[in-house]
Structures are given as structure tokens and as C-alpha cells.
Amino acid sequence: MDTEQIWTFLTGSAEVDLAGESSAVAAGDTLVPADAPRRIATAEGFTAVVASPSPSHAYNPDARTPDGACALAPRDAEPLLPAWIA
């Protein structure tokens, strides 16, 4: 993301890889700075409130779509305005 986002987890849990550092997050935890590569994965699901200035774009720092990226991920060098922000 090209802007700071504040994620506050309300329910569930997730594993967050933020700039190569992995952390477990759960209800009550808050995270995520701007311009840091991140991946959020969950087996059980979670609910979070995310606050960010608009517009806020997702992008691939190395301009390459990672293998296994979901359909909602940005593609190569193209920034993406996520649907939950638009």
C-alpha cells in the first residue's frame, strides 16, 4: 500500500508477514505502516476495521505479481485501487 493503513482486528486471527518479519495477530491487535511489503493469511478468517487516506493504492514493490497471488492482488507494475477503499 502506498499510504499508511491502520488495521485493527476485531475477531479471528491471521499471520502477517510485514517486510519479511512474521507476526501472529488477533482481536485487539493493530498494525501496518505504508510502503512495506505485506502478506496477510488466515485459516479461520478475521474481521478488521481498516482506516486509510483515500486514494490508497496496492502495488507490487518489485513490479512482479507473486506466484499464487489471488485474483484481487495488483498485477505486475500496475497500482490497484482496492474495492474496499474505492
Image: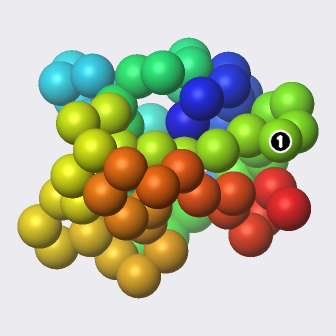
Quarter in which the C terminus is drawn: bottom right
Indicate the secondary structure of the residue bearing disc 1: loop
Residue 28 visible within the image? no
Query: Residue 9: x, y in percent?
Result: 65, 43
Q: Report the residue at 55% width, 36% height from top.
A: 1
Query: Residue 74: x, y in percent?
Result: 44, 61
Q: Report the residue at 40% width, 22% height from top.
A: 36
Q: Report the residue at 77% width, 64% height from top.
A: 84
| Residue tagged 1 | 55
Q: Which of 62 and 35 is in front in this view?
A: 62
Most distant residue in the bottom direction: 71
Crowd class of label 1 (few under 14; some 14 to 19; many from 20; radius 10 Å): few
Most distant residue in the front direction: 77
* Number of on-image labels: 1
Asked where in the image residue 34 lies, by quadrant, the reply is top right
Q: Is residue 52 above or below residue 80?
A: above
Q: In this view, does 69 lie above or below 9?
A: below
Indicate left or right for 11 with 1 as reference. right
Residue 59 visible within the image? yes
Query: Residue 64: x, y in percent?
Result: 21, 52
Indicate left or right for 75 with 65 as reference. right
Asked where in the image residue 55 lies, by quadrant, the reply is top right
Type of residue at label 1?
A: Pro
Q: Nearer the viewer, residue 24 or 66?
A: 66
Q: Report the residue at 31% width, 57% height from top.
A: 76
Q: Which of 38 and 9 is in front in this view?
A: 38
